[in-house]
Amino acid sequence: MACECPQNTFRFSLRLKEANELIGYAELNGILWPHRTSWITIAIADEAEWGKGYGKEAMQCLIRYAFMELNLYRLQLSVFSYNTRAKTLYESLGFQREGCYREFLERDGKRHDMYLYGLLRKEWKE
């Protein structure tokens, strides 16, 4: 029996225009269509490409796609407390910290929180 379920993941490659070099990916996943919500994820693997604005540009495109093309209402993501660069990026895009999973992860012998961030379509439009 074939599944009639709508697609709930949209994954995009991040490539440099000049060299067509793959540097990462961005995706919407776990979409709950009846509720119009989705997780949003981005990863740029090569540290040499960090801090050049690629992540922000990719997130802006993906957010616009989610709200304007897929008609989603809410996007959410999680980030570890030590990832200052990511938190700064997400907050600059309008994401709000909504919750905290305390001491969720152990890394290098230390415990770290995991934060939940969310962005609503009406906040993004403002």
Image (tube, rainbow, N blue to C red):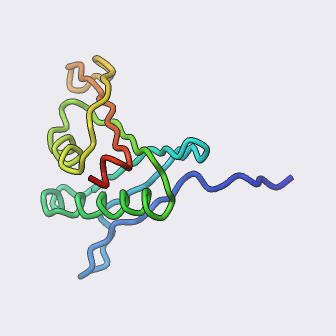
Along the line of sight, the residue nearer the viewer: 30 or 63: 63
Left or right: 68 with respect to 58? right
**Placement of 18 over or under 62, stated as above or below:** below
Left or right: 29 with respect to 41? right
Task: Identify the residue at image location x=49%, y=48%.
Answer: 29
**Placement of 70 over or under 99, stated as above or below:** below
Task: Identify the residue at image location x=28%, y=17%.
Answer: 103
| Image coordinates for residue 91, horizontal then vertical, percent | 20, 43
| Image coordinates for residue 20, horizontal then vertical, percent | 31, 78
Count of numbered labels shown in the rendering:
0
| Image coordinates for residue 1, horizontal then vertical, percent | 86, 52
Residue 56 picture quarter: bottom left
Task: Identify the residue at image location x=32%, y=71%.
Answer: 15
| Image coordinates for residue 61, horizontal then vertical, percent | 33, 64
Q: Which residue lies furthest to the bottom in this view?
A: 18
Left or right: 37 with respect to 16? right
Task: Identify the residue at image location x=59%, y=47%.
Answer: 33
Residue 113 picture quarter: top left
**Placement of 115 over or under 60, stated as above or below:** above
Residue 17 picture quarter: bottom left
